[in-house]
Image: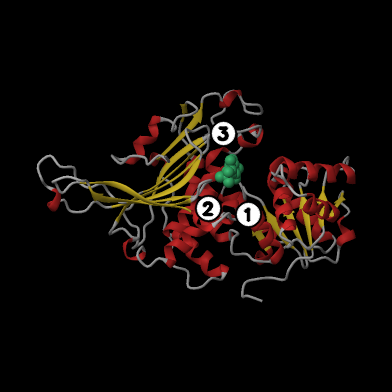
Amino acid sequence: MIAGTQPVADALVLFGATGDLAKRKLFPALYHLEQRGVLKVPVIGVARSDWTDTAFCEHAHDSILKSIPDAAASAIEPLIGRLDLIQGDYDRHGSRQAVFYMAIPPTMFPTVARSLASVGLNERGRIVVEKPFGRDLVSARELSATLQAVFPEERIFRIDHYLGKESVEDLLVFRFSNTLLEPVWNRNYVRSVQITMSETIGVEGRGSFYDGVGSIRDVVQNHLLQVLALVAMEPPVGPESSYLQDEKAKVFAAMREIDPAQLVRGQYVGYREEQGVTPDSQVDTFTAARLEIDSWRWAGVPWYVRCGKGLAKAATEVVVEFREPPSLLFDEAGGPTPHRNLVRFRLGKHDGVTFTVQAKTPGPHLDSQNVDLSVDFAAALGQRREAYERLLDDALAGLPRRFAREDVVEQTWRVVQPALDAPGPVHPYFRGSWGPSEADRILGGDHWFDPS
Ligand code: BG6
């Protein structure tokens, strides 16, 4: 067994099997695992008491077809054959080495964890917990304590589905397998780093959930800060999970808490009319913040993070902006000074990397202009597996590397806590825009690199 891995599970127990996450992500992911022949265990759904076995199987079937219209019957049928429904009588499965997947509201975690323990299912099993992990630093600690009273920390797998994305994991591989980057990946050469997660969709029927959460808890504390850590971290000393988590923990330990003066929150016009949203809601659907890491590598470099719903384009990008070159050679009267180099990691749908560099403008002068050196990963590397499929596979196999560790999660809450305690006003913005213009305030003369 590789160090840091655990025994392979012999069952997957899905709490919240009739819920939204199971429908949108988990059943399609299970289908892909079945299709690849790697799903070997029974899948036991825990559902509301008024569901029958047949209704549950039909629900799984419909969920798969909704996401994957051309799904093959040759994989759907065996998957349906693995499904079983239980309504709370967990002791039937008492001897299992199961993975318990909590696709349920966090308020229910303590009750479920305790019932599992009451029939001894915690003795060998692993628990997979969906984000948001807590609502703030205090509740995240309480939640960890509750779960750790039942499962040891190494068998608590905290999901952040961004860690299951190939494009996000590529940040680590791209940085540390390309020697040309490392010498310049620091405050001496990097001027700023921007991370943008922009969505065109609104809250899409999740209004009552979202209105109790907002964008800081929904994506900044988890997805954006996990991405940031991969861009900022020192090289881990080995591939084991603990080395990777240690380096992330160091990034956050060196990160100052968000300064409320360097935070702008927004809310799209029309959000308050969404179903489940309170009419005078002050919840943010947009956040922009300037962060700082007080380390030898990054001191003085601004890290701008920005996310929002109802924005102009659906994209997740990291843009590393380098310092400008000396302009001596380019001082000819009236000529343009060279632009700064950019490395743009596209982490969303059309993932890949673009280096924006300078090349000579044709003509008699020593002028330069931007040209892009770009790679589209799907074209270059082929199609990759979806995040949930990879993470379910890892949870069953007992591989913790693509999950979030307790101390890292707590550090991220510490960083965002002032934004939760003193959030300031929420600025309206129109759908289809890049958020409220107030967001420019934190840039101090820089500008946003909007995804193109
Ligand atoms: C989820 C958030 O974690 O991530 C959603 O709760 C968000 O609000 C989603 O829409 C975005 O995920 P992806 O993979 O589509 O970028």
- Amino acid on which the number 2 mark rests in the picture: Ala
Residue placed most toward the observer, 277 or 347: 347
Q: Is residue 6 visible?
A: yes
- Amino acid on which the number 3 mark rests in the picture: Ile
Question: Residue 185, position in %: x, y?
Answer: 35, 60
Question: Residue 26, position in %: x, y?
Answer: 71, 49
Tell which tag, 2 or 1, sits nearer the viewer. 2
Q: Where ligand 1 lies, by image quadrant? A: top right
Q: Is residue 226 visible?
A: no
> Which quadrant is home to the C terminus?
top left
Tell which tag, 3 or 2, sits nearer the viewer. 2
Judged from the image, the secondary structure of the residue bearing numbered disc 1 is: loop
Looking at the rendered structure, the number of numbered marks drawn on it comes to: 3
For the residues bearing labels 3 and 2, Cβ distance under 8 angstroms: no
Question: Residue 187, position in %: x, y?
Answer: 31, 58
Q: Quadrant of residue 235?
A: bottom left
Q: Residue at x 52, y 46 (%)?
A: 348
Question: Distance between the Cα atoms at labels 1 and 3?
Answer: 23 Å
- Name the residue carrying label 1: 159
Label 3 packing within 10 angstroms: few (<14), some (14-19), many (20+): some
Residue placed most toward the observer, 443 or 138: 443
> Which quadrant is home to the N terminus?
bottom right
Question: Distance between the Cα atoms at labels 3 and 2?
Answer: 24 Å
Query: Is 229 displayed left or right of 127 in the figure?
Result: left
For the residues bearing labels 2 and 1, Cβ distance under 8 angstroms: no
- Name the residue carrying label 3: 201
Judged from the image, the secondary structure of the residue bearing numbered disc 2 is: helix
- Name the residue carrying label 2: 378
Q: Residue at x 77, y 50 (%)?
A: 15
Query: Is 293 displayed left or right of 133 in the figure?
Result: left
Q: Residue at x 59, y 55 (%)?
A: 384
Residue placed most toward the observer, 201 or 425: 201
